[in-house]
Image (tube, rainbow, N blue to C red):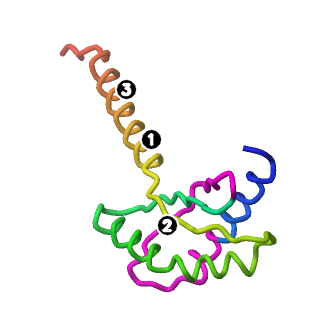
Amino acid sequence: MNTRHIQVAEEIQHIVSYLIQRELKDPRLGFVTVTRVEVSRDLKYARVFVSVMGTPEEQKDSMVALNSARGFVRHEVATRLTTRSVPEVQFKLDRGLEYSDRINRLLTELHDADVTADKPEATT
């Protein structure tokens, strides 16, 4: 990926993050964070990866809300982005944060179990 692709991806990430936080008023939209954006080589497509906190049902509802707002998001990106063509926006659920949180909890549980096993028993 060259510098131009990186700049476009970062700019789209900032715009979409702003839109989600300030402009989109869909009640199905939960706590959504844009984690990264990947653009295609020809800049025709932008994959916007989002992390959604909540239950699987809340995640699904948030993704439905985002996908229904794709036209609005693309229009807003077009007005704020300084490129000749505007990429088609695709939202993808990013499970990376969820996965790392699960690994963290498992490691903490293992550590706590190990510490408990290593404690000498008190004799009375």
Q: Which one is nearer the viewer's eye here, 31 or 9?
A: 9
The disc labelled 2 sits on which kind of residue?
Answer: Val
Dividing the picture into quadrants, the one containing residue 113 is top left
Query: Is residue 30 highlighted in magenta?
Result: yes
| Residue appearing at x 41%, y 84% in the figure | 27
Give the image location of residue 83, x and y in percent: 79, 69
Assign the N terminus to one quadrant of the image.
Answer: top right
The disc labelled 1 sits on which kind of residue?
Answer: Ser
Dot 3 alpha-carbon crowd within 10 angstroms: few under 14, some 14 to 19, many 20 or more: few
Tell me the CA gap for discs 3 and 2.
31 Å
| Residue appearing at x 78%, y 45% in the figure | 2
Q: Which residue is mark 2?
A: 32
Of callouts 3 and 2, the N-terminal one: 2
Horizontal side of 18 relative to 96 (left or right) equals right
**Which mark's residue is nearer the viewer, 1 or 3?**
1
Q: Which one is nearer the viewer's eye here, 105 or 63?
A: 63
Q: Which residue is mark 3?
A: 111
Mark 3–mark 2 CB contact (< 8 Å): no
Q: Which one is nearer the viewer's eye here, 114 or 104?
A: 104
Mark 2–mark 1 CB contact (< 8 Å): no
Dividing the picture into quadrants, the one containing residue 21 is bottom right
Q: Which residues are magenta?
A: 16-42
**Which mark's residue is nearer the viewer, 3 or 2?**
2
Above or below for 6 versus 28:
above
Horizontal side of 5 relative to 103 (left or right) equals right
Q: Which mark is residue 4?
A: none
Tell me the CA gap for discs 2 and 1.
17 Å
Give the image location of residue 68, x and y in percent: 44, 79
| Residue appearing at x 71%, y 77% in the figure | 78
Q: Which residue is mark 1?
A: 100
